[in-house]
């Protein structure tokens, strides 16, 4: 209900699109108060902006995530990029694309030649990774391993960019690299995880050679649908031996990954 002034004129004027707000998190139908925003909408904007900033600056709980994977029987490596701290990561994107010397040495001791190297990077939203990555990885690994594909130890990379999976995949001798990474937060999506897939990963690979799945989060693309889409792209990448602009998304509504249903739940 609109608040009223003494002259019976509304202080806050609503918006005819008000009913559409239940279908989207986007900032629509915010109304007005004179020539400005209503106080409620102004405060909501400031809160969303603060949450987006926090998503970028929140420290990556890498050790806790590693513990979760190890408790689930999934081997992982705790790595970092060549960016020494968060400020350098944000101002020097090139350093986020390469591993530190310690991380390269750690990978060199690992078995080479798995089909898939799987990377989990904090990117620009650690929150997205904290909320979604563990469940996604467990379901995805069960899905691809049931099809006979081997997955290298999961690489948890602090201050990593998309392209860091190229170096990791190359060092591990993998045919395909996948990077689960926190996406740049929006005002309605501070917890969105992106997924990048690259065939024949090598340092210097450019972005047209990748496929991307975006907006995996509550309120966006669900984990189950994200796994299904990724499994389709993996299956097609191995069939065609390519990725990027030449790998088209032609997934049908009834597609089952490798002919199998995705597990809805996983027991501990």
Image (cartoon, helix red, strand yellow):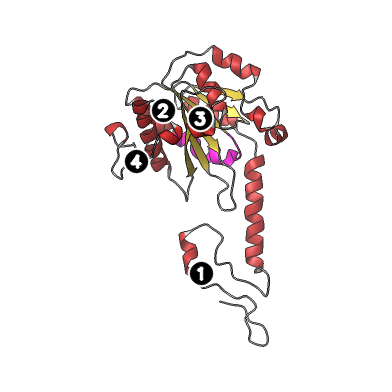
CA gap, disc 1 and disc 3: 42 Å
For the N terminus, which image quadrant? bottom right
Q: What x and y, as percent, mark residue 14?
A: 57, 74
CA gap, disc 4 and disc 2: 15 Å
Q: CB of mark 4 within 8 Å of CB of mark 3?
A: no
In the rendered image, the vertical position of residue 36 relative to residue 97, given as above or below: below
Residue 34 lies in the magenta stretch: no
Q: What x and y, as percent, mark residue 199?
A: 45, 26
N-terminal of the pair, mark 3 or mark 2, is 3
Give the mark toward the camera: 1 or 2. 2
CA gap, disc 3 and disc 2: 33 Å
The residue beneath circle 3 is 68
CA gap, disc 4 and disc 1: 36 Å
N-terminal of the pair, mark 4 or mark 2, is 2
The residue beneath circle 2 is 242
N-terminal of the pair, mark 4 or mark 3, is 3
Alpha-carbon neighbours of circle 1 within 10 Å: few (<14), some, or many (≥20)? Answer: few
Disc assigned to residue 18: 1
Q: What x and y, as percent, mark residue 132?
A: 49, 39
User: Dot 4: what SS?
Assistant: loop
N-terminal of the pair, mark 4 or mark 1, is 1
Q: Nearer the viewer, residue 145 or 176?
A: 176
């Amino acid at each position: 209900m609109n608040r009223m002034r003494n002259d019976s004129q509304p202080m806050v004027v609503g918006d005819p699109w008000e009913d559409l707000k239940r279908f989207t998190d986007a900032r629509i139908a915010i109304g007005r108060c004179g020539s400005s925003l209503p106080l409620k909408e102004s405060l909501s904007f400031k809160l969303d902006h603060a949450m987006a900033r926090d998503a970028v600056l929140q420290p990556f709980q890498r050790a806790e995530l590693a513990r979760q994977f190890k408790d689930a029987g999934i081997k992982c490596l705790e790595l970092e990029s060549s960016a020494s701290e968060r400020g350098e990561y944000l101002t020097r994107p090139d350093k986020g694309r390469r591993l530190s010397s310690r991380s390269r040495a750690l990978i060199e001791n690992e078995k080479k030649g798995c089909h898939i190297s799987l990377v989990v990077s904090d990117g620009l939203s650690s929150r997205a990774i904290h909320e979604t990555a563990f469940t996604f990885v467990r379901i995805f690994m069960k899905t691809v391993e049931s099809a006979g594909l081997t997955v290298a130890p999961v690489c948890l990379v602090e201050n990593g960019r998309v392209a860091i999976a190229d170096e990791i995949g190359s060092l591990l001798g993998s045919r395909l690299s996948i990077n689960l990474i926190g996406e740049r937060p929006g005002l309605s999506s501070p917890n969105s995880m992106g997924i990048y897939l690259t065939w024949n990963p090598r340092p210097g690979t450019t972005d047209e050679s990748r496929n991307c799945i975006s907006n995996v989060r509550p309120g966006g693309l669900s984990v189950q649908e994200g796994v299904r889409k990724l499994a389709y792209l993996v299956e097609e990448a191995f069939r065609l031996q390519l990725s990027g602009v030449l790998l088209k998304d032609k997934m049908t509504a009834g597609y089952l990954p490798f002919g199998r249903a995705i597990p809805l739940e996983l027991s501990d």
